[in-house]
Image (cartoon, helix red, strand yellow):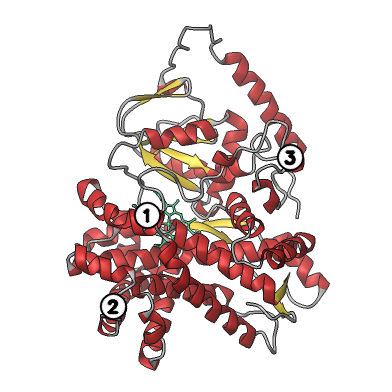
Amino acid sequence: MHYRRCGTVRRLHLLHQRCAQQQAPSPVPGVQAPVLPFARMPGPRRIPLLGMLNDIMHLGKPAELHLRISKYHEQYGDLVRLQIGAQKAVFVRDPHLMRKTFQLEGAHPRHPLPESWTYFNKKYQYQRGLFFMDGKEWLQARQIFNKPMLKDFQWMEEPIRGTCEATVAHVRQRCATNATLDGLEAFLYKWSVEVVLSVMLGASFAKCQQSPDFRTLVERFSAVVYDIFRCSSELMNIPPALADRLNVQPWQQFEKVVPETIRLATAIIEHGMEHSRQDAPDGLLELMVQKLDKPVMMRIFIDFIIAAGDTTAFATIWALYLLACNQDMQRTVRAAVHESGGLECPAVKGVVRETLRLYPVAPFIGRFIEQDSSFGEYSLPKDTLVLLSLYSAGRDERFFADPEQFNPYRWQRGDVANRPASGNTPSASLPFAIGARSCIGQKIAQLQMHYLLSMVLNNFELTVGGDQQEQQQQQEETIKPILKMITVPNKPVKVCFRAIQTDRL
Ligand code: HEM
């Protein structure tokens, strides 16, 4: 599938780059380039009288923020200064400065939080998990999970593989009569929730799954976690205090589903603990029970599931979509999976990296800067919010050759043919962030996506949009990424899974 940057925009971009180069202070060997004041950083002008209203208007529809920011980068360059309400903010597209952002985050990195959640947490004095913690409390909790989840994570392979096998068997059943898997989002949500539960409970998860009560709990739990995503994304369009005051429907629903999630999560944990293998505990829950009080354990557990649900489900939808739209590449990757005989061959890893480059689930990772610093040629005041423009950087031809092309092989070392003259720049795509506060679920997400995609390629041929060629073309042409907290398709993606003869999973 090709998306091409329009010629005029590209010309404007090159023109701007040239102007920026001309304006930049000329570097004299041995002499540090002068640091320009923050106020000189380019960006759209703020009209003082309109203040906040102007900020909101020039940012446009929240669902299209990634496009608006891309336009600003075309217009102003790799750094764009913006005032968002009272907050000084900078959008950055340059890979070197994106990495530098994580060096400026300090020992207890702070990131922006979704307003609907912070409002809700405050209203109900509700304590949350890792994503919402700060300072020492965050660091203490985080240190418990770094080693088992990011460093020595091999123990997670078995439970995750088991859950993916069960999911693919389920797809086979459901697609036996109708190749289009209806309700793909909800289906993959349940899979994400089950994967995290299998990591939490270890081998006991399969045992718990034999109980119909437990299965009903998990089913219900996945549904409410999905509801949470739906309401919070609708609440993006309205300040939460106003949503609460007007008692709008998504707010009412939000207030209903959050306590329900807690109730169900408690029931699941209690069931899991009751049935866990006391002789050989092998899940994360065991470690949490040893190291954390029950209330803290609960909130971290629930937040793992909330963080896992939408991110992995939608990243996988995008991966399936890209494979389904690119038939030749799909066949090549399938052949590579067959040849490797495993579930994590470089081609499949490339599919995941490529998917997250084109559709970064979190398109604007943010960090508040800990102290006055220099940033490129500018100074950056303490507490400035730096936002990484992952969507724009991932589609920039300076960093990726033929950037709109889905090419999982560009990530393989030594693949000279697919490298741009200036080289591929992997650090222009940081979908899980880096540094002390990067995604704690990165390995879970990667393992589960590698396994599921390999199994799917072994078992099915993927197409989009239904049986008719016309329907397929329509889906390819009209599916666009929009922001609903994370990057999602603007309408449901229809993927057809046509079973192929195989003796492997
Ligand atoms: C494709 C899937 C995923 C992507 C792209 C993703 C991306 C991210 C990113 C970019 C962050 C950093 C956000 C920031 O600092 O502002 C983050 C944080 C986090 N992620 Fe993920 N994530 C994914 C899956 C998961 C999964 C499966 C889990 C389950 C454990 C998870 C749990 C978390 C948690 C708890 C945090 C907060 C960490 C902290 O603040 O210390 N994520 N994720």
Residue 354 appears left or right of 51: right
Nearest to N terminus: mark 2 or mark 3: 2
Residue 372 image offset from top left, x and y in percent: 32, 25
Instruction: Say which element carries label 2.
Output: helix
Whether pointer 2 and pointer 3 mark residues with C-beta atoms closer than 8 Å, the reply is no
Nearest to N terminus: mark 2 or mark 1: 1
Q: Residue at 51% across / 63% down in the picture?
A: 447
Q: Which residue is tagged 1?
A: 114
Whether pointer 2 and pointer 1 mark residues with C-beta atoms closer than 8 Å, the reply is no
Which amino acid, mark 1? Pro
Report how far apart the C-alphas of labels 1 and 3 lie in the structure. 42 Å
Residue 379 image offset from top left, x and y in percent: 40, 22
Q: Which residue is tagged 3?
A: 416
Residue 253 appears left or right of 90: left
Which amino acid, mark 3? Val
Quadrant where the image shows the C terminus: bottom right
Residue 208 image offset from top left, x and y in percent: 37, 86
Give the image quarter of residue 261: bottom left
Q: Is mark 2 within 8 Å of ligand 1?
A: no
Q: Residue at 64% across / 84% down in the picture?
A: 172
Instruction: Say which element carries label 3.
Output: helix
Residue that protrudes farthest toward the bottom in the picture: 212
Residue 253 in view (yes/no): yes
Q: Which residue is tagged 2?
A: 269
- Front-lying residue, 488 or 323: 323
Instruction: Say which element carries label 1.
Output: loop
- Bin the neighbour count of mark 3 within 10 Å (Cα to Cα): few under 14, some 14-19, many 20 and up: few
Residue 226 in view (yes/no): no
Give the image quarter of residue 276: bottom left
Which amino acid, mark 2? Ile
Report how far apart the C-alphas of labels 2 and 3 lie in the structure. 50 Å
- Bin the neighbour count of mark 1 within 10 Å (Cα to Cα): few under 14, some 14-19, many 20 and up: some
